[in-house]
Image (cartoon, rainbow, N blue to C red):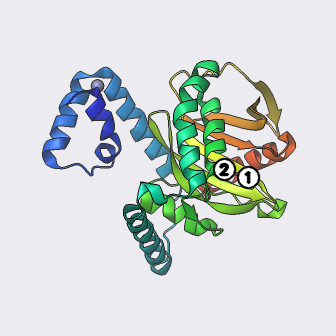
Amino acid sequence: MNCDTFLACLHPYVDGELGVSDTLAADTHAAECPRCRSVTARERSFRQLLSQEPRETAPPELRRRIVTRIRRSARARALRPWLALPAAAAVAALLLVSVLPLVHRAAPGVIAELVDKHIAFAQLERPAEFVSADRREVGEWFRERAGLRVTIPDYSPAGIRLVGARIADVGEHRAAYIVYEKGHTLLSVFIAPAPRDAADAGGTRVSFRGYAYLTREQKGYRTVSWTEGGVVFGLVSMLDYQALLECADRLREERSAQTRL
Ligand SMILES: [Zn+2]
């Protein structure tokens, strides 16, 4: 096994879903390759961090419903040929492929990547892979689909409606993506492992209700982000900074309330 094949099976490896011989091969490679070893360690600690959130056992009925929906959409994906994809989605995918390398040279860093994802997902017919306005359903979907325990903040008091969620690839990692809508304006919330070079040069440091944030405008979108325990939280939207900071504060409050329980 080399680095490429190792990284290709990183997620099933970390999830313990590989067969015996593949697991052995991966163990062997990780033992002799510092880079893959550290990627694995980060992936594990990211999952642990998310799994520290309190286990709120879903009622069996809710869980059954989520599992059924995951299976059904997996089947639908398998049956749908590429050409039958909505034209907008195909165009967005092509744009993503051709534009990303340039964008990365021009504006490196995880925030730039989150903005690109926000734009790409917004162009899809359905930005959310799993559509639901029910926070418990979305939380359960992350658990079933990717083994992630994610806080789904409630922004409904501010008229910001939960649309759904998807699993996004950020860097070499799997990230949680939650999408909201205020009128026709999308708000993306990303929860991703922090990159090794966490010092993101661009941006303005601000303090809001005692917490430190990085604000940055990119391609006309505003972003608010912070890093906590090896995880980067990023909000991307056309909403103004005041709204984004309120949303960020709310997410932090809900996370700390849950871990205190
Ligand atoms: Zn390697």
Please state, as top left, top right, bottom left or bottom right, where the C terminus lies in the image: bottom right
**Contact? badges 2 and 1 (CB < 8 Å):** yes
Residue 259 in sight here: no
Is 227 drawn above or below residue 244 in the view shown? above
Q: Position of residue 212 (x, y in %)?
A: 75, 32
In the image, what residue type sits under mark 2? Ala
Q: Position of residue 170 (x, y in %)?
A: 52, 37
Tell whether circle 2 marks a residue whose Cβ is less than 8 angstroms from ligand 1.
Answer: no
Using a 10 Å C-alpha cutoff, classify the residue at mark 1 as few (fewer than 14 neighbours), some (14 to 19) or many (20 or more): many
Residue displayed at 66% across by 40% down: 234
Q: Secondary structure at mark 1?
A: strand
Mark 2, residue position: 122
Q: Could you say which is closer to the camera, residue 130 or residue 190?
A: 130
Does residue 121 appear left or right of residue 4 in this picture?
Answer: right
Q: Position of residue 122 (x, y in %)?
A: 66, 50
Closest to the camera, between mark 2 and mark 1, is 2
Q: Secondary structure at mark 2?
A: helix
Does residue 236 appear left or right of residue 138 in this picture?
Answer: right
